[in-house]
Amino acid sequence: MARLLPVGEFGELNTVLGVGVVIAGAGDFGVSTLLAKARARHENSLVMGCIVFNRASSLFIATAFAGTLVIIEGFSFAGFAFAFLAVALAIDKNVDCLLSIPIADGDRSTAPISIALRRTATLIAFLTFLALETPALWSYSLSYLLGSLFGQVHIQMFLRDKLSPICEKVKLIATTRSAFPYFVSNFTGQIRLLDTPLVSSVAGVVQAGLYSGATKIVQPFSLIPGVVTTVIMPHSARLSPDRARVLSRKLVALAILFLALMAIPTIFSADIISLILGEQFQAASAALGWTLLGLAFVSLSSPLGSVLQSQGHERLVAKNGFFFAIANLVGVLLGSWASGAQGAAAAIALVFFIKSTTLVYFIENRVRGDILKVTG
């Protein structure tokens, strides 16, 4: 898309995507994380409550966001293309929520298959639409929608015989109350996806386009936090406090290794930008470098939060997430005001480094206190 659209229009598209993902995350209300924990603990009523809630919220988000985009764009050609994109985002988010079930069951293949299926279907559809000379924006929106529908069919077929019938009434109010701490931590983590709209509002759509180009290159790695978090939650929920601390230290070691690996492509960020996006994005090379370095800490913070949540410290993680969500927004605003796309990327890297450091501190101290309570 970066090669098919002007830098400014590419920035506008990613502004819609960023807002859409945040809205979809808000509609999820944390039940995706709660679903993994409930499934691991065989709390079948709560599992069904999570599924029903997420299904209803996804439908509401798809309808409301799509309608809003059409109105904002003045019922234009682009507005209806964005509407299809909004529906696709809602369906995709629902699939991600339902994948918590096979992951909690110890199934290691269904989630990767779902991701590969959706991405492959989207790519094939996108190339087909382009070959049929469909406008780039419509090609992107329709292919995204088809990919998410393939994922929905796949997960529904998988779950057909996996859910136990529930005789008792599903209590949605109790579900939302249990999910709220997870909502705060998850949503505040997703607020960072408002970075492109913020860069656009402060530095203009061209800088937003440059920033989007840099972040799109590393987008495949952005799946890491969500996937690792979903896997960690049911696993960590079964661990004792001391083993949870060991798990967090392994996560930190992996993040340090990942940071070292990312330092290599950072050196060649200008060449990578030119090769993938073209010369019009050459000014985004510094932003790409900071994005690559910050990726290690962005990927680390969510799994560390899951370790704390699994050990009963959901509210601590929620408070931490809220504080650093505000810090991230302020950092992006100041960074983009001072240095455009490069400043925004550097600010995010710094904020998530500090956030990960505080989470490690809490795990070492709060979970250590849990161990002393058990052994004492």
Image: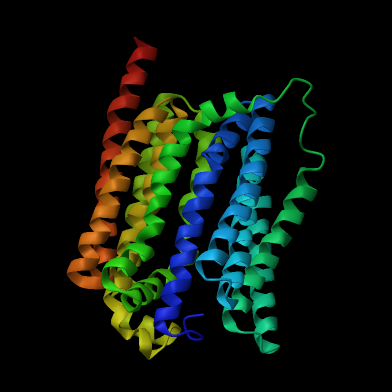
In the rendering, at what x and y percent does residue 340 appear? Answer: 25, 72
Residue 170 drawn above or below residue 97: above
Residue 314 as seen in the image, left or right of residue 164: left
* Quarter assignment of residue 185: top left
What's the residue at 35%, 48% (across, down)? 253
Is residue 268 visible from the viewing direction of this image? Answer: no
In the rendering, at what x and y percent does residue 317 appear? Answer: 37, 34
Q: Nearer the viewer, residue 157 or 368?
A: 157
Residue that protrudes farthest toward the top in the picture: 376
In the rendering, at what x and y percent does residue 125 appear? Answer: 69, 76
Residue 158 drawn above or below residue 195: above
What's the residue at 50%, 52% (across, down)? 23
Residue 145 drawn above or below residue 45: below
What's the residue at 72%, 54% (across, down)? 152
Residue 262 drawn above or below residue 152: below
Residue 86 as seen in the image, left or right of residue 243: right
Q: Nearer the viewer, residue 2 or 84?
A: 84
Residue 94 as seen in the image, left or right of residue 320: right
Q: Nearer the viewer, residue 44 or 199?
A: 199
In the rendering, at what x and y percent does residue 376 appear? Answer: 34, 9
What's the residue at 54%, 51% (across, down)? 24
* Quarter assignment of residue 10: bottom left
Is residue 142 visible from the viewing direction of this image? Answer: yes
- For the image, the number of numbered tags is 0
Q: Nearer the viewer, residue 35 or 241?
A: 35
